Amino acid sequence: MTPLIAHPNKKLSGDIKVPGDKSISHRALMIGALAVGQTRIEGLLEGEDVLATAAALKSLGVDIAMESGTGVWRVSGRGISGLCEPDTVLDMGNSGTAARLLMGVLAGHPFTATLSGDRSLQSRPMDRVIKPLAQMGAVFRTRSGGRLPLSVEGLAQPLPVEYELPVASAQVKSAILLAGLAAPGTTRVVEPKPSRDHTELMLSHFGAELEIEDLPGGGRAISLRGQPELVAQDVVVPGDVSSAAFPLVAALLNPGSRIMITGVGVNPLRSGLIQTLIEMGGDISLENQRREAGELVADLVVKASSLHGIDVPASRAPSMIDEYPILAVAAACAQGTTRLEGLSELRVKESDRLAGMARGLQASGVQIEEGEDFLHVHGTGGAPAGGATIATELDHRMAMSFLVLGGLTAAPITIDDGSPIETSFPGFIKLMNGLGCKIEETHP
Ligand code: S3P
């Protein structure tokens, strides 16, 4: 446990880069491992979640190396269905994305592998991925309730399926598509609302054939032709918008601040938070927009602003699902009420984020109403009281959100454990303090 305290800070300023996108980093490693030839990855997130994916792929026979000094990673792909049976349990750490996407990859391999993870990951539902992958022919044995540890026995040629997702989930969609790579025929996934499309973009970048249809009612269908020849590529991973969210909100809310965050991925299916903060009155501009490995990238210029509460529609949730904790912090300091709807998925993230935000904000002097799938935050229009100690429950985004809040409250905020931040944002404290924050280790 690493307890941390965030003291109230003054204006923030500086130009920064945030670490590489976590979702894209997992995919670059996995798809690189299934391609033929050597994939070169620049900007890979070297956080614990992605390192868990790299370690698991190494246990599956993939040669992965980092060039010292340059930060460039090289993955020697083994081709589709080319991974080897592991002789150890694959430890996916804290990462739901690593576990669920790898289950898809393993469904297309004719051997048995066992996956485990930390206490948080062992409590998360896996049946949402098991159900479609079992239809494709993979066989699973799980702990009760469809939880990790679990074993998966895949097959060389899974059945191509058509599967309609009950909830918009990029992890489930991606698991099916990754299994579909080995299937002889077309795998089709229908999603009720578009979720992040990094898997589709990365697979296309490596030469797979995909057809995307927008459906009446706002859904989307993705068809993948099975058994393509994936060819190794160069990948540049953009900065993670979900990590950029923390300095971004901190700068918006500290009077007099101006920061620039360069090279941030602004894929429209990921950047719902930026749209929402602009609607709340935030002064954020996207400059120098360009495309890298199929992904839209921009430099974000953020200036302190007076925010006001708004109603955030449930339909926007898939495009900002990981950003609700930090959005709730912004809402807590805004003028008026912000209504966040359609949040049931937050209950099955690294922790129950809906309950955790409600508890932590209340303890910090913010009035809230929590429902099964909504959070209404009554903003203080200034500095909330603070002075709370927050249990982060192995959840990196809860940890970082409350450290940002501690910079804005009248009294400091303590978190019981900052170590989960390493899963997604190595260097967070140094980067935030470099902008003007005051976060340090403490002994509560
Ligand atoms: C992710 C998808 C999202 C998100 C997670 C990363 C991905 O989960 O919360 O942090 O990389 O595909 P769901 O697809 O389960 O909503």
Image (cartoon, helix red, strand yellow):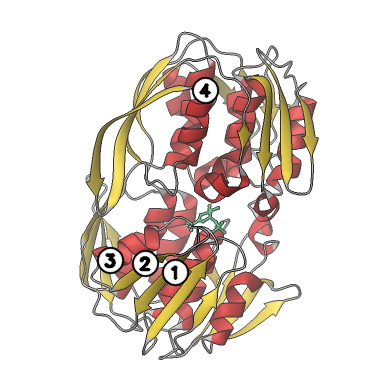
For marks 3 and 2, give the one nearer the viewer: 2
Which sits in the foreground, 285 or 133? 285
Residue 247 position, x and y percent, is: 47, 27
Mark 2 or mark 1, which has the lower sequence index? 2
Residue drawn at (63%, 76%) of the image: 150
Front-lying residue, 210 or 72: 210
Q: Please give the name of the residue rendered at 53% of the width and 77% of the height, measured from the top-left corner.
A: 163
Q: For marks 1 and 4, give the one nearer the viewer.
A: 1
Q: Residues within 10 Å of mark 1 (few under 14, many from 20)?
A: some
Residue 221, numbered label:
1
Looking at the image, residue 114 sits to the left or right of residue 248; the answer is right
- Three-letter amino acid code of the residue under disc 2: Ile
Which label's residue is closer to the chain start, 4 or 2?
2
Q: Position of residue 323 (x, y in %)?
A: 55, 40
Q: Dot 4 lies on which element?
A: helix
For marks 4 and 3, give the CA distance.
36 Å
Spatial separation of the CA atoms under disc 3 and disc 1: 16 Å
Q: Of the two numbered discs 3 and 1 on the same chain, state the one appearing first in sequence.
A: 3
Please name the residue shown 48% across and 57% down the image: 194
Residue ID for mark 4: 250
Q: Earlier in the sequence, mark 1 or mark 4?
A: 1
Regarding mark 1 in the picture, which secondary structure is present there? Answer: strand
Q: Check whether the beta carbons of the residues at disc 2 and disc 1 lie within 8 A of each other.
A: yes
Per the model, the C-alpha gap separating discs 4 and 2 is 37 Å
Q: Is residue 303 left or right of residue 408?
A: left
Cα separation, mark 2 vs mark 1, equals: 6 Å
Residue at image mark 3? 204
Q: Is mark 2 within 8 Å of ligand 1?
A: no
Residues at marks 1 and 4, CA–CA distance in whole angstroms: 37 Å
Asked whether mark 1 and ligand 1 are closer than 8 Å, the reply comes as no
Q: Nearer the viewer, mark 3 or mark 1?
A: 1
Instruction: Please give the residue where the numbered disc 2 appears in the rendered image.
Output: 212
